[in-house]
Image: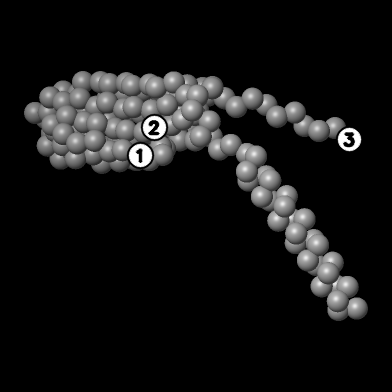
Amino acid sequence: MKTALRAGAILVLLATNSWASANLNLSKSNVNRIQTKGTLVTASTSIAGAVSQIVYQTPSAGDFLLTQICTGIAAGGTLVQVGGVGIAQVGSGLCQTFTPGMFLSPDQVVTCTTFAAETNSFCTITGLLGAPPLATPTPRP
C-alpha cells in the first residue's frame, strides 16, 4: 500500500514539475517584451526655482518602463515623483538608472521637484514604451 501511494505521489510531482517548467519557459515577461519591441522615449523639462515640473505623463494604453532619470545642478538634488509618490531623490548633476527598469502605471504624471530658489536646472527621463500585450483567447469547453 505504501509503495503504491509513493509511486502515485511521484507521478503527480513529475506531472506538476513538467507543467511548471513548460509554463515558465513558454511565457515572456513584460520586461522582455518591451525591451525587445519597445520604443525609446526621452522627455525633459527645464526647472527654474523651487518648483515642481511635469516631465512626462504615461499613456493610457501600453506599458512604460522607466530606465533612467538625470538631473542638472540643483542644491539638495531633485525629487522625482510618479503620481505624487516619490520614487527617487537624485543627487545634483547625477543620473539614477533602474535595471532592468521600473514599470509605471498608465496615466501617471512624472514630476521633478527642486527645493532651492536659485535653481536653474533640468530633469530628463528615459524609458521604453511598449504596446499593450495582445489579448489571450480564453479556451472554451
Compute the Cα span from label 1 to label 2.
7 Å
Q: Nearer the viewer, residue 2 or 101?
A: 2
Contact (CB < 8 A) between labels 1 and 2? yes
Residue where numbered disc 2 is placed: 66
Compute the Cα span from label 3 to label 1.
43 Å
Give amino acid for label 2. Answer: Leu
Q: Is residue 17 left or right of residue 42?
A: right
Residue at the image position 49 percent from the left and 28 percent from the top: 36
Quadrant where the N terminus sits is bottom right
Above or below: residue 60 compared with residue 74: above
- The disc, 1 or 2, on the residue closer to the chain's N-terminal end is 2
How many marks the image carries: the answer is 3
Quadrant where the C terminus sits is top right
Residue where numbered disc 1 is placed: 98
Q: Nearer the viewer, residue 82 or 96?
A: 96
Compute the Cα span from label 3 to label 2.
41 Å
Q: Is residue 124 left or right of residue 99?
A: left
- The disc, 3 or 2, on the residue closer to the chain's N-terminal end is 2
Above or below: residue 3 compared with residue 56: below
Give amino acid for label 1. Answer: Phe
Residue at the image position 13 percent from the left and 31 percent from the top: 73
Q: Quadrant of residue 102?
A: top left
Q: Residues within 10 Å of mark 2 (few under 14, many from 20)?
A: many
Residue 134 percent across, percent down from the top left: 64, 25
Residue where numbered disc 3 is placed: 141
Q: State the colouring used for the structure image.
A: one colour
Residue at the image position 51 percent from the left and 34 percent from the top: 32
Give amino acid for label 3. Answer: Pro
